[in-house]
Image (tube, rainbow, N blue to C red):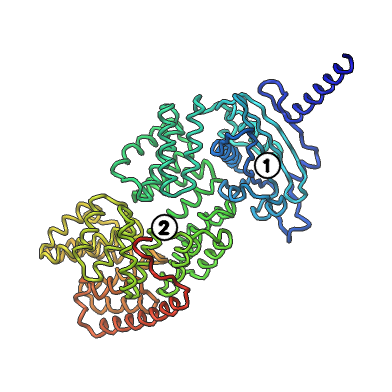
């Protein structure tokens, strides 16, 4: 038997060597490091310019943490957990202000692809990549990472973490990674960044649920947001004291409100209680500040900008918060201030749609439409199968009154997303603007079978019924939206309130309409009303009712506030501003300044404004004082002639198949 025994021993030695190579034979809670050599350290720190890659010179202290690869054996996979760990590591590194860390959404676009190190470094604008694998086995987890020079493809550092699977262990690993990378690049960590590796909960299932909730929210869409809320609720149930679970819930609920999925009246108290509690426990919690800012932003709270700034003071490398802050600045009529933040966000998150979309819409708000459409073109190059680059190009053309081109691009968007009721809503709107009511009727019929409580398509349908003479159906849609308390979405509230105004006019009872405005827009009844993009059209409509009710002094206060707000720079830029173009002319007409109203209306028409022109002029009693003036009639004739010309262009595109026919009701 000696020969057999010798064979067994050799086989065992070979097996042990294999296990060591795989990293499974380390002492409990071990770490195996391969330290940097001095030349590699110098390369990582100084990041000399590459000899190739077209002169590509990324910042030396720049890193992209590539998606981790799951190595679990067997059929069980935990993609949310692995992706969540990856996102946590990247977020922890991004807290170091001396490092440029590529945002997770950009690197996630490369997940599951065979990415080339040099090309990926250039695409992401970084000098280094971190790649990693994760393996779970019963109650243990093994994470192996290596830092790679994106130009030489040399591995500068590698380390394996083999631990008992627990939340504390995962946070210890994150802290050690952050410390090691800071040492490699010789950077100073902030006191918050050097905190110990104690986890925020001891419940691993709750932690997994929070990671899943964050990823689902980042994914977007109504189904994913619903699941994100469910996961966050699960985490709070498993550990009611888990602060991050509460923040995840508040954040997902806020996104759901913003998307029309939830009613703000149902969720507001809970959201505020969660965030107040989180910030009282940890005033330096950037996620809580961002969640509060988002909630404040969608509720029109001016403190949102301050909350975003506070979050960025704590974590200046958060591309998503930079983007959201820029969007809030744009909404506040400050698009010029938004641009630097968007440039930084695009630098950190170069392959993600959100910052690129925000950059394009900001250019539109600045009336830099060519730059906007160049940006939307880059989006189409990055993700040709995503409708956003096509949809936003359509809205950019809409802002310039080029309705035919807007309709072409919106149809291209629908080819990629045929179930989107908002895209269908825009197509309905554009057909109404072009006065192709036969096509608009078909789009409205299709939406009727799909829409229940989505504010934008409901508003587009209500306006269509109004334009085609079915006021009762228009009123039904408006009453439904107001009864449900739907959030304002793409100027939907202005449509519903306009129809309620006209109901009061038809009944000869302006006071009843004033009461509706008082219920839904109490801000307009202040001594000094604060007029913004979200209530300007409603303000002029209310002023008409106040005039008719003999409350002219109140009307004059509102109208003067409208004129002052309208004169702010960039207030009427972009497609959203196109809905406000005539508000100043309406206010002047209601104040009795006929010459001023006609001159202002001539100005906006000459600039190319065409968005819903008949709704805003010919069918708008705010212009009754100038309706019989020759100048007003001439403007309407010009608008009608241009509409006819653009409609003929659309018909030509339909004949050549460039624009698809309206869908059947059954489709």
Which residue: 74% across, 49% down?
47
Where residue 355 is drawn, which disc sits there? Answer: none
Q: Which residue is mark 1?
A: 131
* Most foreground residue, 101 or 465: 465
Q: Dividing the image into 4 quarters, which one contains the N terminus?
A: top right
The image shows a total of numbered marks equal to: 2
Residue 131 placement, left or right of 364: right
Q: Position of residue 457 (x, y in %)?
A: 33, 59
Above or below, 19 against 296 in this view is: above
> Which residue does the numbered mark 2 point to in the structure image?
419
Identify whether 161 is placed above or below 545.
above
Q: Secondary structure at mark 1?
A: strand
Q: Is residue 531 visible?
A: no
Residue 445 position, x and y percent, is 31, 64
Is 570 left or right of 139, judged from the image as shown?
left
Q: Quadrant of residue 521?
A: bottom left
CA–CA distance between discs 2 and 1?
37 Å
The reply to whether dot 2 and dot 1 touch (C-beta < 8 Å) is: no
In the rendered image, the residue lying farthest to the front is 1
Q: Secondary structure at mark 2?
A: loop
Above/below status of 5 relative to 648: above
Q: Is residue 339 left or right of residue 497?
A: right
Query: Where in the figure is residue 485, as x and y percent of width and height?
Result: 26, 50
Q: Position of residue 114 (x, y in %)?
A: 68, 50
Q: Nearer the viewer, residue 440 or 360?
A: 440
Image quarter where the C terminus lies is bottom left
């Amino acid at each position: 038997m000696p020969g057999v025994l010798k064979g067994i021993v050799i086989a065992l030695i070979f097996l042990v060597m294999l296990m060591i190579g795989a990293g499974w034979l380390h002492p409990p809670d071990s770490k195996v490091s391969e330290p940097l050599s001095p030349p590699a350290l110098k390369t990582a720190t100084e990041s000399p310019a590459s000899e190739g890659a077209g002169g590509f010179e990324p910042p030396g202290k720049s890193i992209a943490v590539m998606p981790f690869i799951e190595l679990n054996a067997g059929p069980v996979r935990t993609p949310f957990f692995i992706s969540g760990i990856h996102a946590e590591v990247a977020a922890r590194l991004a807290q170091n202000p001396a490092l440029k860390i590529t945002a997770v959404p950009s690197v996630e676009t490369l997940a599951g692809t065979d990415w080339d190190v040099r090309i990926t470094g250039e695409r992401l604008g970084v000098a280094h990549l971190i790649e990693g694998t994760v393996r779970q086995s019963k109650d243990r987890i093994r994470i192996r990472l290596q830092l790679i020079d994106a130009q030489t493809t040399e591995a500068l550092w590698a380390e394996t973490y083999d631990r008992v699977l627990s939340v504390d262990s995962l946070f210890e690993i994150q802290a050690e990674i952050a410390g090691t990378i800071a040492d490699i690049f010789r950077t100073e960590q902030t006191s918050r960044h050097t905190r110990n590796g104690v986890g925020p909960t001891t419940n691993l299932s709750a932690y997994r649920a929070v990671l899943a909730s964050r990823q689902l929210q980042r994914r977007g869409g109504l189904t994913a947001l619903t699941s994100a809320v469910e996961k966050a609720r699960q985490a709070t149930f498993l550990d009611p004291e888990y602060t991050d679970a509460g923040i995840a819930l508040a954040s997902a609920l806020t996104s759901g409100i913003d998307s029309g999925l939830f009613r703000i009246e149902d969720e507001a108290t809970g959201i505020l209680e969660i965030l107040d509690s989180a910030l009282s426990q940890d005033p330096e919690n950037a996620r809580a500040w961002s969640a509060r800012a988002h909630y404040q932003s969608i509720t029109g709270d001016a403190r949102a900008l301050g909350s975003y700034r506070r979050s960025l003071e704590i974590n200046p490398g958060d591309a998503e918060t930079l983007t959201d802050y820029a969007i809030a600045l744009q909404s506040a009529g400050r698009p010029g201030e938004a641009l630097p933040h968007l440039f930084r966000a695009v630098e950190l998150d170069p392959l993600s749609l959100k910052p690129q979309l925000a950059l394009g819409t900001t250019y539109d708000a600045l009336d830099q439409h060519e730059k906007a459409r160049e940006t939307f073109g880059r989006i189409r190059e990055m993700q040709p199968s995503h409708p956003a680059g096509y949809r936003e190009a359509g809205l950019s053309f809409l802002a310039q009154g080029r309705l035919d081109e807007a309709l072409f691009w919106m149809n291209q968007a629908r080819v990629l997303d045929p179930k989107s009721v908002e895209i269908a809503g825009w197509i309905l709107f554009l057909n109404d603007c072009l006065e192709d009511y036969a096509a608009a009727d078909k789009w409205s019929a299709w939406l009727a079978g799909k829409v229940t409580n989505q504010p934008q398509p409901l508003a587009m349908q209500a306006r269509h019924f109004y334009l085609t003479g079915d006021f009762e159906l228009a009123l039904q849609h408006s009453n439904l939206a107001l009864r449900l308390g739907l959030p304002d979405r793409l100027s939907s509230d202005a449509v519903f309130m306009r129809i309620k105004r006209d109901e009061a006019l038809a009944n000869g009872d302006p006071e009843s309409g004033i009461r509706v405005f008082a219920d839904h827009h109490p801000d307009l009844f202040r001594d000094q009303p604060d007029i913004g993009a979200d209530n300007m059209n409603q303000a002029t409509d209310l002023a008409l009712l106040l005039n008719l009710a003999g409350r002219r002094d109140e009307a004059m206060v509102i109208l003067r506030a409208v004129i002052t707000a309208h004169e702010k720079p960039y207030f009427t830029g972009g497609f959203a501003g196109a809905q406000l173009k005539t508000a100043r002319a309406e206010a002047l007409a209601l104040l009795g300044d006929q010459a001023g109203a006609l001159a202002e209306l001539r100005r906006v028409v000459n600039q190319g404004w065409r968005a819903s022109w008949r709704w805003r002029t010919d069918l708008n009693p705010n212009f009754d004082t100038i309706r019989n003036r020759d100048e007003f009639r001439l403007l309407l004739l010009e608008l009608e002639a241009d509409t006819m010309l653009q409609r003929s262009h659309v018909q030509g595109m339909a004949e050549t198949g460039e624009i698809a026919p309206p869908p059947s009701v059954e489709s």
